Image (spheres, coloured by chain):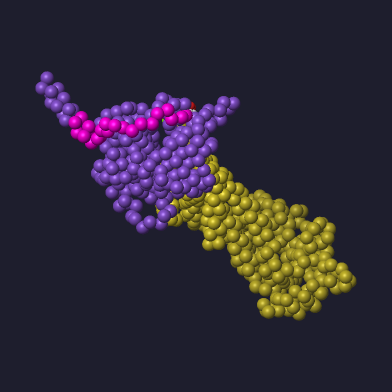
Amino acid sequence: MAMIELRRIQRRYVVGDIVVRAIRGLDLDVDTGEFVAIMGPSGSGKSTLMNTLGCLDKPTEGSYVLDGLETSKASPDEFADLRNGKIGFVFQGFNLLSRTSALENVELPLFYDRSGSKIDPKARAKAALEEVGLGDRLDHKPNQLSGGQQQRVAIARAMVKDPAFILADEPTGNLDTEMTMEVMSLFQELNDRGVTIVMVTHEPEVAAYTKRIITMRDGAIVSDASVTDRRRASDDLEDWKKKHAALAVAEAAV
Amino acid sequence: MTFAKLVRASALSIFRNKMRSFLTSLGIIIGVCSVIVMVAVGTGSQAQIKKQISSMGTNLIMVMPPRGPREANRLSMADVEKIRSEASYLSAISGEVRLSGSKVVGGSGYWSTSVYGIEPDFIEIRNWAVQSGEFFTDKDLAARSKVAVLGTTVAAKLFPGEDPMGKSVRIGTTPFTIVGMLSSKGSTGMGNDQDDVVMVPLNTAVNRLMRDRTIESIEMSVVREDLMDEAQAEITAILRESHKLSAGDDDDFDVMNQSEIIKTASQTSQTLTTLLAAIAGVSLMVGGIGIMNIMLVSVTERTREIGIRMSVGARRRDILLQFLSESVILSLLGGSIGILLALGLSWALKTFMSMPTLVSPAVIAASAGFAAAVGIFFGFYPARKAANLYPIDALRYE
Ligand SMILES: Nc1ncnc2c1ncn2[C@@H]1O[C@H](COP(=O)(O)OP(=O)(O)OP(=O)(O)O)[C@@H](O)[C@H]1O
Ligand SMILES: [Mg+2]
């Protein structure tokens, strides 16, 4: 059974007299363990789709079954619990709490945990930050971290509760090449461990790290293809670093 | 989310904005402080009044005209005489008239003061004493002698640095010879100078200084405390007979014992206390509105934070409780500071301005409770506003 089943999803926004049809009858299945990139021009409805998948927004029409649960009938509280337990969301703008340490940011989903699990939030958050390579930045506030580091904190927050599935809306949109590769290698590691990932990106190079590319236009899917020559972000990162070092040496020689 | 976590998170966010939090609580601080101080001053002066009346003498009974127009007063010297000869439980009795704001001329000029027309028993009933000379006697009374006994304040004003004994003062057009000086009683807590007084024989006052022949009150001491009720009943019966009231008529006078006198005397100050406390209570409300205002600003300012919290799984209730506990903590903090401030202030009033303040634990508890209630009441609307935000709208908020 698919982890995500979207059937005839529509999302309309009414702004004054104008009705914006952001998603127009969209069908999509995503299986467990998939790594999906969503591409398409600006305004094609990618973010709207992600917000729907992330239970941050309800579709105007259609059915969304997440892990066997029909979400269209869920109450706001059930929606909150889904976001807390099943989904990790990574945003383009990081969306970290300012003036709050990295550790406390990562603890946040555990703060709202209602499963009654006995895990120590501090230890768990610390482990998650170590996994994204920020074990030495626990007490840093977001404004004391680089963009790539902030996004890694956000990823640590998204995975701290071991969600079945991670959603990322242009997670590398604000990052440079090196940071992008860092983040993508993290996603690939997570995906290797069985976490389902759906992410939006504008860059074909980034999409090349995923397993499946969906292209949207005007609120509908126009193409859906598997990635044939999938790249490893960690390898690319190493190459890039080597090249960079060589370049630096050459520059120094000149 | 546990209660401890909630309080911790709210406290953190309050301390992150120390200055704003302080300014927000200022309304509550001032409100709570003024409620406690007002009530402290009020109850303090009431306690003072009580002490004073108790010190007036023991087992005091007072007869006064009924409340209402002056014309309803039917108390007379004849009533005093009838009680004196017929009542069986009294150790002392004195009729009394008072002329406040009387101009007394003599010595170095004139002085406006209260003139009491009384009988010799009065100083026994009121536990008063003469420091020099003598108090006038029953003989002076019978003879309507024009003699006067001065309080220390009047003596100091009219005869500074002199011995007033044997000198003469004029009250209205009547000259009086000074035969004695009262010992000092000091001022009441409310600032009334008890020594600002001139005492003359009742008969002289009624005949020479008053326009009509009624008297203003009759004061009596009962021999033993356990006879108060009997004495009161007997006096009532004597006066009813004296005023020729038939069985169905209401009393045209008031017989009050000491505790009733205290109640009457402290009524004004009680009303004043209530009024002041109410005004202070209004400032507490205004403080609450201040909290609501800041919480509303805070909700707008922190819309993104709310969105982030919702995106990681906060339920509406979590957000509601977070903001509610922030406003309650703010108002409780303000309340606590207000209480400390009030304690300091009433101590200062007592120590440096000799105002008889009395801080009661009940008032402290009540104002702390009220502060918390204000926090809940005025925090609820902003908190609900925050909780009802739609996650994606909150996240997108710029
Ligand atoms: N809150 C809203 N109110 C009204 N219209 C909206 C709202 N959010 C999105 N839209 C409209 O829905 C359409 C799809 O928007 P969406 O943000 O999903 O696009 P996108 O594919 O994510 O674009 P981008 O690549 O620029 O992020 C757009 O036409 C947009 O104007
Ligand atoms: Mg978008």
Question: In the rendered image of this protein, which colour is used for chain B?
Answer: yellow
Residue range in magenta is A219-240
Give the x, y percent position of residue B323: 49, 47
In the image, residue A89 sits, relative to residue A81, either above or below, namely above
Give the x, y percent position of residue B247: 88, 72
Residue at 71%, 70% in the rendered image: B257
- Front residue of this view, candidates A123 and B336: A123
Q: Which chain is purple?
A: A
Give the x, y percent position of residue A26: 47, 33
Quick check: can you spot residue B382? no
Give the x, y percent position of residue B64: 76, 65
Residue at 63%, 68% in the rendered image: B54
Magenta-span inclusion, residue A220? yes
- Front residue of this view, candidates B103 and B395: B395
Residue at 79%, 70% in the rendered image: B80
Could you tell whether B68 is left or right of A117 in the image? right
Q: Residue furthest top?
A: A254
Could you tell whether A140 is left or right of B175 in the image? left
Magenta-span inclusion, residue A99? no
Could you tell whether A52 is left or right of A165 in the image? right
Where is residue B68, by image quadrant? Answer: bottom right
Q: Residue furthest left?
A: A253
